[in-house]
Image: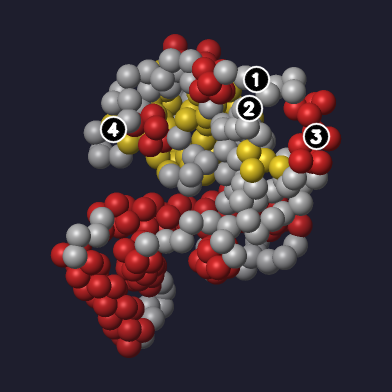
């Protein structure tokens, strides 16, 4: 389906960096992103019909080669180029997957249309479903620029509650006003916080195949790649994408569809024979699986 989707993520990132809302990228990260963008642009042009003019290909190759040369120079200077490159490729892979998932979902809604309309309620709904990460709660993340009581946004990092380090406030007045409700949860232990955390793919992989006992992996199903058994490419809260494959008796996980959120308690990381990785869900794992549409 010919459908062009534009990502505003790079521009948003630049604005957030300028405002001090996010950590600035290193020089290696910036150049790695350029190289990855050029690489995926070349891949995309190879699949176009009709093919773009050779001059366009050459311009993109020059862009790629220029970024590649800069990265090699930084590597010689001791910069962690490998880490920056992996991060950049993961980001491009995620963006491509999001775009494809949105386009396919639009095609399902409008099988007779070849052009996706932007700005309407349907396109916004699809964007929020596939481009947004799952709505996590209890994962320990705190927005350091938004007051937990009055919800006003500050350009400077706000101060934590000194007791639990889980909420931030504009000032003493907000902290005092919030205390009546906050004191009921303020003394949660570190153990309780760890148990309520939602694992990412990287955290699960770090366990080297051992089950994450007492913890839960939470990912969003993005793209259905099923053939004989159900296989989905799934994204975690950091945007990292891995595969989830159903090795159940019927090769299915009931309720798992594009856009759904999968929660797996006591998960294990798995390396597949084709070189991909993620999660292999067996029949006995189904009791620990929860599927929702949040």
Q: SS class of the residue under badge 3?
A: helix
In three-dimensional space, the C-alpha distance between marks 1 and 4, rounded to whole angstroms, equals 42 Å
In three-dimensional space, the C-alpha distance between marks 1 and 3, rounded to whole angstroms, equals 16 Å
- Contact? badges 3 and 4 (CB < 8 Å): no
- Foreground of the two, 141 or 177: 177
Instruction: Tell me the mark number nearer the camera, choosing from 2 and 1.
Output: 2
In three-dimensional space, the C-alpha distance between marks 2 and 1, rounded to whole angstroms, equals 7 Å
Is there any visible trace of residue 185 in the rendered image? yes
Whole-percent x, y for residue 205 in the image: 34, 31
Instruction: Tell me the mark number nearer the camera, choosing from 3 and 4.
Output: 3
State the image quarter where residue 58 is shown. bottom left
Label 4 sits on residue: 272
Would you call the spot at circle 2 few (<14 residues within 10 Å), some (14-19), or many (20 or more)? few
Q: In screen coordinates, is 74 left or right of 41?
A: left
Q: SS class of the residue under badge 1?
A: loop
- Contact? badges 1 and 4 (CB < 8 Å): no
Q: Residue at x 37, y 78 (%)?
A: 51
Q: How is the image coloured?
A: secondary structure
- Foreground of the two, 275 or 225: 275
Label 3 sits on residue: 176
Q: SS class of the residue under badge 2?
A: loop
State the image quarter where residue 153 is shown. bottom right
Which residue appears farthest toward the front when viewing the image? 172
- Contact? badges 2 and 1 (CB < 8 Å): yes
In three-dimensional space, the C-alpha distance between marks 2 and 4, rounded to whole angstroms, equals 44 Å
Label 2 sits on residue: 163
Would you call the spot at circle 3 few (<14 residues within 10 Å), some (14-19), or many (20 or more)? few
Label 1 sits on residue: 187
First of labels 1, 4 by sequence position:
1
């Amino acid at each position: 389906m010919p459908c062009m989707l534009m990502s505003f993520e790079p521009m948003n990132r630049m604005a957030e960096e300028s405002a001090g809302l996010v950590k600035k990228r290193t020089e290696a990260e910036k150049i790695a992103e350029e190289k990855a963008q050029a690489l995926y642009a070349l891949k995309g042009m190879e699949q176009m019909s009709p093919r773009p003019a050779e001059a366009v290909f050459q311009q993109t190759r020059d862009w790629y080669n220029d970024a590649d040369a800069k990265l090699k120079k930084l590597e010689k200077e001791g910069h962690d180029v490998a880490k920056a490159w992996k991060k950049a490729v993961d980001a491009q892979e995620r963006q491509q997957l999001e775009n494809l998932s949105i386009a396919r979902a639009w095609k399902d809604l409008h099988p007779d249309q070849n052009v996706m309309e932007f700005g309407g309620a349907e396109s916004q709904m699809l964007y929020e479903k596939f481009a947004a990460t799952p709505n996590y709660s209890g994962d320990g993340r705190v927005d350091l620029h938004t007051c937990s009581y009055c919800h006003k946004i500050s350009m400077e990092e706000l101060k934590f509650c000194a007791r639990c380090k889980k909420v931030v406030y504009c000032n003493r007045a907000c902290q005092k006003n919030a205390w009546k409700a906050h004191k009921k949860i303020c003394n949660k232990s570190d153990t309780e916080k760890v148990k309520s955390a939602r694992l990412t793919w990287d955290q699960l992989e770090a366990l080297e195949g051992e089950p994450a006992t007492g913890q839960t992996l939470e990912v969003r199903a993005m793209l259905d790649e099923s053939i004989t058994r159900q296989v989905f490419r799934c994204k975690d809260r950091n945007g990292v994408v891995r595969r989830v494959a159903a090795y159940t008796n019927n090769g299915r996980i009931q309720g798992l569809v594009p856009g759904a959120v999968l929660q797996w308690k006591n998960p294990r990381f798995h390396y597949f024979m084709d070189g991909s990785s993620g999660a292999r869900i067996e029949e006995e794992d189904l009791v620990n699986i929860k599927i929702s549409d949040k």
